[in-house]
Image (tube, coloured by chain):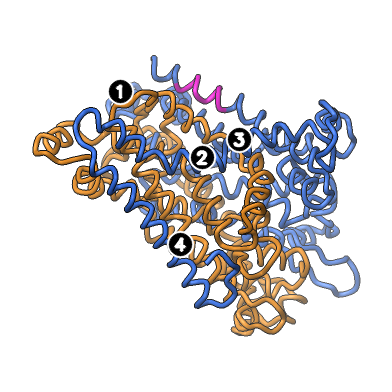
Chain colours: A blue, B orange
Amino acid sequence: MFNTASTTPEKILQMLAALLLFAAVMGVILFIAGRFGGKRGDKVVAYLYLLPAVLMLAVGLVYPGLRTIYQSFFDAAGNAFIGFDNYHTIFTDKDQLTVLRNTVFWVVVTPFVATAIGLVYAILVDKSRFESFAKALIFLPMSISFVAAGVIWKFVYEYRPDQGNVKQIGLVNQVIVWLGGKPIQLLIESPLNSFLLIIVMIWIQAGFAMTILSAAIKAIPDDIIEAARLDGVNAWSMFRKITLPSVQPTVVVVLTTIGIGTLKVFDIVRTMTGGNFDTSVVANEFYRQTFNADNQGLGAALAVLLFVLVIPIVIYNIRSLRRSEAS
Amino acid sequence: MSTATPVTTPPLKAEKVTAAGVAKKRLSSPWASIAAIVIAVLWTLPTFGLLVSSFRPERAIKTTGWWTFFSDPTTTFENYNKVFGEEGGVNLAAFFVNSLIICIPSVLIPMALAALSAYAFAWIKFPGRNVLFLMIFALQIVPLQVTLIPLLKIFVSIDITGTFWTLWLSHATFALPLAIYLLHNFMREIPAGLIEAARVDGAGHVSIFFKVMLPLLTPALAAFGIFQFLWVWNDLLVALVFAGGGDEVAPITLQLANLSGTRGTAWHLLSAGAFVSIIVPVTVFLLLQRYFVRGLLAGSVKG
């Protein structure tokens, strides 16, 4: 039951066995919980209900996290203690600095552009006849994998050499040729390639921004809008003085959520360039150092860096939520 | 902790005015429409191009752009036959099965565990409740990357590497913080009187959980379930680390990523493969969009 299943019936059997085992564990917990009653029993029931989740989180999340922090102070093989050397490498090595630069590009550009497009689009299609269809078009990229998104866009950026009657099959290069230019090796030219990868993330995240912001826009009280309208406010000041201030707390949440997601982006880079041609980002570099370059220490330090970078964004998020709660 | 940011969608009425609606009207409608159409086209075109390509013959894909399809429409299912077939080593059918096998327990297990935990946090008083809840809430921000290598070592030491168990256990664990938080928020909104009435009637926590909570919880469970399903189906990182070694348990995303890495110009395979991999999440999404959006609003707007 704990072996590798290789045929489809075996796999299905193993899955059913796992689900049965899980159901049995749940059954035991509920059976024991059922024997306790009254105020004193309450505590026992609570701990029983929490036991499996807390156990899994402790073994699968807390311990590994602490272990990785510890490991980040060790060398490539994980044997010798080297202090902050791995962190020193991240901030001084030429390749690692490129990784950091790219990560900054990603985290600064993606949230703002995706949120801006999402907001504009939400306003444009609001109350239109095709609202739900129009929204679904923008939203669909959110449901597919980053890998599939990477494949879709790699095809858009495809390059064919500029010789004889070789025709372009990628849309971007074809447009360049139609406009009289020469085709470009889009995914190889740095730093252009990083921005082209960022477009893929924007393509995915704009739908998220649109959905959340659209809900916020629809929640603006009607009387405010009516009053402004009677005052003869024009479209631009309606947007600036009513819409934007009303959705501002939501905008902050959307920006930070996309920012955190972007920080961890890995699949897009790996699928489209493999991190080559100066396109690597921290999350991809973590994987490359750990598994391809066999440098566990540096890999661990990059993972910890990722964690450290998330924290200020989350704190900012919570603080701005508190502020909007207070007002 | 739960800020009730106003996000509930009011019922749509044609004549209702909204700020956006007014802004749009004043923006002289034709321009607004054109801008919306331009964005919609830009967003759809990349996928559409690859979809058209997946039905074109290999030679045509490699020598002409997909837009020539409209002047020279030749279609074939050959690409789909190839990615499903065992010849050529693509064999997506097997990976498709793997993805399903990975997804089902990875959704059900955290769902059940989180429902129990959320119930304890929401409706039972016990020492350390707030501290423990805060800790689990905080775990949401831990990036997976931080946990992968030590977790892999644990799996090696208990000898389950290369099996589905590694993926089921890790996906289930990673999902718990968000799941507990989401379900807890939802459970808190259920009126306390309902629980008290059941207690007065002599019901214990087990029967309250099953008879009162679970039926009311269905929309929240659905929202989390879709969330988790899309996450697991679309995951690459966890699969690479724990199932990267063998094809036996690798999901479809992994095979697609490998295909893109090793045969990056085999567009006839990549195009068909990409669509096979996205057909399930897109269908799930379109059918259950309502729940998905609700989960999205609850998960990110509440903070």
Q: CA distance from mark 3 to mark 2?
A: 25 Å
Q: Secondary structure at mark 3?
A: helix
Which amino acid is tagged 4?
Ala
Q: CA distance from mark 2 to mark 1?
A: 52 Å
Q: Are marks 1 and 4 in contact (CB under 8 Å)?
A: no
Q: Are marks 4 and 3 in contact (CB under 8 Å)?
A: no
Q: CA distance from mark 2 to mark 4?
A: 19 Å
In this picture, which residue range is highlighted in magenta? A314-321
Q: Is disc 1 in the same subunit as disc 4?
A: yes
Q: CA distance from mark 1 to mark 3?
A: 36 Å
Left or right: residue B155 compared with residue B210: right
The circle on residue A259 is 3
Q: Is disc 2 in the same subunit as disc 4?
A: yes
Q: Earlier in the sequence, mark 3 or mark 2?
A: 2
Q: Which residue is mark 1?
A: A227
**Mark 1 surroundings: few (<14), some (14-19) or many (≥20) residues within 10 A:** few
Q: Which residue is mark 4?
A: A18
The circle on residue A57 is 2
| Residue B246 visible from this viewpoint | yes
**Mark 3 surroundings: few (<14), some (14-19) or many (≥20) residues within 10 A:** many
User: Which quarter of the rendering shows the C terminus of chain A?
Assistant: top left
Q: Secondary structure at mark 4?
A: helix
In front of the other: A72 or A132: A72
Can you give x and y, in whole percent of width and height, for residue B249 in the image?
60, 66
Residue at image location 72% in from the left, 65% down from the top: B258
Can you give x and y, in whole percent of width and height, for residue B179 in the image?
42, 42
Left or right: residue B248 compared with residue B13: right
